Amino acid sequence: MKALLLGLVAVAASLAAVAQPAADPRAKPIEARGPLAPLKGTLLAPARAGAPVVLIVPGSGPTDRDGNNPLGVNAATYKLLAQDLAARGIASVRIDKRGMFGSAKAVADANAVTIPDYVTDVHSWVGAIRRSTGVPCVWVLGHSEGGLVALAVAQGGGEVPGICGLVLVAAPGRPLGQVLRDQLRANPANAPILEQALAAITRLEGGARVDTASLHPALHPLFNEAVQGFLISAFAQDPAKLIAATKVPVLVLQGERDLQVGVQDARLLAQANPAAQLVLLPDTNHVLKAVVTDDPAANMATYANPGQPLAPGVVDAVVRFVAAGKTRP
């Protein structure tokens, strides 16, 4: 594992061509083939031709291309990341998942989806981006659950055609069932429903569905029957095993004040793939905003603040990684 200490790493000469400010970033709609109708996204590119392209794969639930979620997240993380990358000479494509927002017509039921379905969509996006921009390969950046999708995309026993490398941001290093158990246990308010919740997770891990009528009403949204097929699919993925089998370059980027995915997960990913680069960002939370306190309320407040910029070091880490591998065929 190559650990990178932010601020102390000399910038390689190859970084210069990518890191120079890029005037007049240009945004335009872009589409990829979906099951029933096109998948929709936004391409934001610097003015110069030939810029490397980062595909931003969203996190869990109804998260849109900008990184916002109607369930209370309005941090605009992906939009800010795209703008900052464009200012540094790197293009990006941020996307709406099948069945949601601009991609609503791509499938009849947004809940009838699995991790392999999302993998299919990422491959479709990679092809569309290569055709649209002419780049030989695309950098796939997965945030949170999107990191799990990115890892699944890169499987195949060697270099994956069209994939330059992966950037795993706040990605789980353990199966999602284990992560969910820890999240539930961490909140004392869950004590009355914890036993039922843990039993439901175990059942889904075994590939069986859960009868929600037997669960406390507070657990119905989490284990909604409509999403149990997706949960079974997601729980079956082991990120450590996936990254161990990944042959393309990988950057693991993790905030040290993330309340949802911990530094432990990032270290597990890096340990499973000694060639991966690990960057730990101090005072950075799950939505990549700066937080200088241990107060959970202050941390969560950043989730609703689109005007707060990304934490220092986030964009630098991505730019360095892309610049180091931008000539990869």
Image: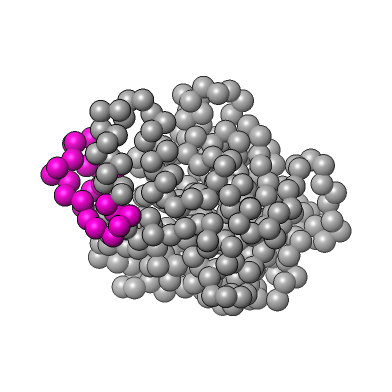
Q: Is residue 99 visible?
A: no
Question: Is residue 205 shown to the viewer in this render?
Answer: yes
Q: Residue at x 54, y 40 (%)?
A: 262
The color scheme shown is: one colour
Q: Position of residue 219 (x, y in %)?
A: 24, 39
The residues colored magenta run 203-225
Q: Is residue 127 left or right of residue 204?
A: right
| Among the 4 quarters of the image, the one containing residue 165 | bottom right
Q: Quadrant for the C terminus, please.
A: bottom right
Q: Is residue 281 above or below residue 38?
A: above
Q: What residue lies at 19% left-to-right and 36% top-to-bottom? A: 216
The front one of 231 and 132 is: 231
- In the picture shown, does residue 216 fall above or below 277? above
Residue 12: percent from left, percent from top:
84, 56
Is residue 189 rendered magenta in the image?
Answer: no
Left or right, 295 with respect to 134, comes to left
User: What residue is rendered at 22% in x and 42% in y?
Assistant: 220
Front one among 172 and 165: 172
